[in-house]
Amino acid sequence: MNSIGQALHAFVISLVSRVTKLLAIPIPVTFAGEGAAKELAEAIGRQNLGKVLIVTDRVLVELGMVRTVQDWLSEAGTETAVYDGVEPNPTFDQVNAGVALLRQESCVAVLAIGGGSPMDAAKVIAACGTNPKDPRKLAGMMKIRRRPLPLFAIPTTAGTGSEVTLAAVVSDPETHAKQQFIDPKLVPLMAALDASMMVGMPPHVTAATGADALTHAIESFLSKTSNETTESYVRMAVPLIFENLPKAFTEGQDRKARSAMALASFYAGVAFTRTSVGYVHAIAHTFGAHYNTPHGLANAITLPHILAFSADAAEGRLAELAEMIGVDSGSTEDKAAAFRKAVGQLLESLEIPVHLSDLTHEDIPMIAKQALSEAWASYPVPRYMNQKQCEEILRAIACG
């Protein structure tokens, strides 16, 4: 990026930062701990809203988790309908199917049960419930005029932080791009962080979603729009992740570790929804759109490469991150290097692959162009990246 481009980019980021600071971004009423999901169901019942559409996936239905929540809601006097057609990296077709069921069943509220994909889909479905138009027309920043239907969330993974963010992401198969919906009105009204809803997560999902939470925290802390408030949440999230993610990965029934990861994901979500993210997410979103790569896995594979790229520009901040995980001695350079090494060791212990096998060398120029296009206007990164540099990183990620 030349000097004029850097100046223009800096201006755009400054403008986005100012707009973000002016936004009143709510934090949902949050129930945490054992039994939190049932507490949320009871709270929904007390509101006498009417019929609630549960947005989830087939796996959670088959495991009986959705039925359990339905029973709690029924005991609280709330009728439900279930849309279980959400898949990883939800598409507009899936969102439209959910909207159709919402209207068919005359639902007046939405409850997301699942990971980031059901929560993203639920947000857009709730928005379409009061803004009757093609969901593609709601994509972008602040395009949701009417407040969505009442929205609630029960995350079953610890990583996306979607239960507290103002954003949703939907894949468009026609363009092979991910469309972002950004609006404070998309933040759920209430959320439940309940370890009992997470103990069934398989290890590979625990690893990928946990790495997603770590990426949120790191990219928020390295953001040029980071501030004292967001940093305080990062300082809570990062130690929790390093201490508890390995335990949750190897001992899935460890409810203490699961609860800690749920809190870490929540804290990281509060942080990054106020600072935005960076190149890790830009590249990961593109992998998801083209190869349907699970978002957390795409982040985990990409993260070490972006930390290496940003090492010099973000040395001081990386050193502070190292201090959060107990690295107290050495120079700033030594601490920064120690943190990067610790991230690599953590990802290795989680059996995160080094390469993305789906990524072909022929696709690299297109992937780089699309990722940089996403990042340019809204990601306040510590070091700018050009097409050539992005392609070099992608070649390192590709197999062979």
Image (spheres, rainbow, N blue to C red):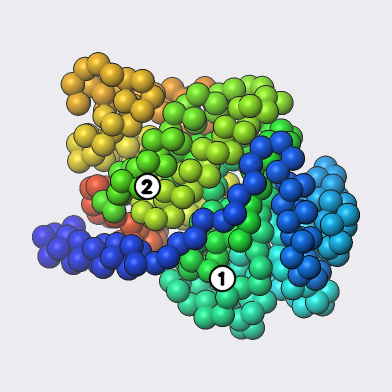
| Residue indicated by mark 1 | 174
Query: Residue 15 lies in what quarter of the image?
Result: bottom left
Query: Residue 209 lies in what quarter of the image?
Result: top right
Amino acid type at circle 2 is: Thr
For the C terminus, the quadrant is top left
Residue at horizontal 43 percent and vertical 22 percent from the top? 345
For the N terminus, the quadrant is bottom left
Residue 368 position in % (x across, y down):
36, 55
Where is 371 relative to 300, above or below? below
Q: How many marks?
A: 2
Q: CA distance from mark 2 to mark 1?
A: 36 Å
Residue at horizontal 64 percent and vertical 41 percent from the top? 32
Whether residue 228 is visible: yes
Residue at horizontal 52 percent and vertical 80 percent from the top? 145
Residue 226 position in % (x across, y down):
30, 49
| Residue indicated by mark 2 | 230
Q: Residues within 10 Å of mark 1 (few under 14, many from 20)?
A: few
* Nearest to the observer: residue 387 or residue 207: 207
Q: Is residue 203 left or right of residue 10?
A: right
Whether residue 61 is visible: no
Amino acid type at circle 1 is: Glu
